[in-house]
Amino acid sequence: MVRCEGLVHIYKAERLEVVALQGLDLEVAPGEMVAIAGRSGSGKTTLMNILAGMERPTAGVVRVADHDLNRLGQSERERYRRETVGYVLQHAMGNVAPYLTAVENVQAATLTGPPRYRARMAAQLLDQLGLGQRLSRRPSDLAGHENQRLALAIALANRPRLLLADEPTAELDTAAAGQVLTDLTAVLREQGAAAVMVTHDPQLETYVDRVVMIRDGRTSSERRWVERQGELVNDELAIMDRAGRIQLPRAYVERLGLTGRVRLHLDDDRISILRAEGDVSD
């Protein structure tokens, strides 16, 4: 569903050039739910804007579904944003029209079918997301978690193949976030849509298939829940790019005092990384 290879994005800030992505690689399978995590400034939102067709990468390959985003013309890009992806901005109110009711917001985002059909489908989707009793309410009459649900419904109105969500639980308390994620997961599974969601929320990580960490504009590691000896454990793997590069976890580097050059030692089926000034036998 998503394939990024060597993705680079450079933008200008005043008189400076800022490298937001530095050769990022990412793959997302159809129907897979992936969370993107990392420190502020690591390139998460830039990646989302590129996948949403809002920005063009400076270099690299980016494909979503059957679309090569580097080759889309303006009209094709607009159609891609309407039909292939749904994008939930970090602040829910950026997705909604304040003067429309909940059902009118979703109906307005639906592209096909006569008005009655679109109204019925909008009401059904809102019901799936827990707003079945709020169809005629305007955003100003809804609670914060309800507006988040409304924003998700608008993004899912055209049954996109890929949902993009930037911090969908950032403005919610723990209980509300859990309820929203439970309902959202059910809708995504029912629609067969894939999802890429930026998050700092550890709770969201338990709802997705895996968590991809971004550091300094590159994917550095990924975490997923796996079963070992009858128990679910959080397994973390470093990601190796096509050039054979990996990023070591920062905590490991700091604990071992690794800086500058390091010594690599191949021993049967494993590679050891040692401080350059130490002996291989240390």
Image (tube, rainbow, N blue to C red):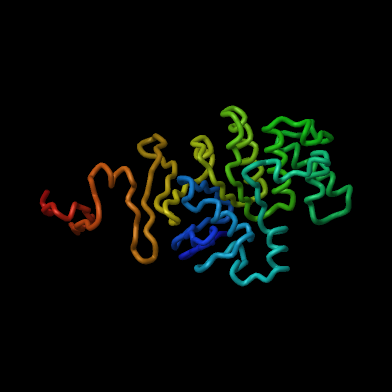
In the visual, does 149 lie left or right of 110? Answer: left
Say which quarter of the image contains residue 53: bottom right
Residues 15 and 61: in front is: 15
In the visual, does 197 lie left or right of 124? Answer: left
Check the image and name the residue furthest to the front: 15
Q: Position of residue 98 (x, y in %)?
A: 79, 40
Relative to 217, does residue 127 appear above or below in the rendering?
above
Seen at 74% across and 49% down, the residue is 157
Seen at 23% across and 45% down, the residue is 256
Q: Quadrant of the N terminus?
A: bottom right
Q: Position of residue 249 (x, y in %)?
A: 34, 47
Image mark count = 0
Residues 154 and 141: in front is: 141
Q: Position of residue 14 (x, y in %)?
A: 54, 59
Seen at 78% across and 31% down, the residue is 141
Residues 173 and 230: in front is: 173
In the visual, does 86 lie left or right of 101? Answer: left
Say which quarter of the image contains residue 55: bottom right
Say which quarter of the image contains residue 132: top right
Q: Position of residue 11 (x, y in %)?
A: 53, 61
In the visual, does 262 lie left or right of 104? Answer: left
Residues 9 and 77: in front is: 9
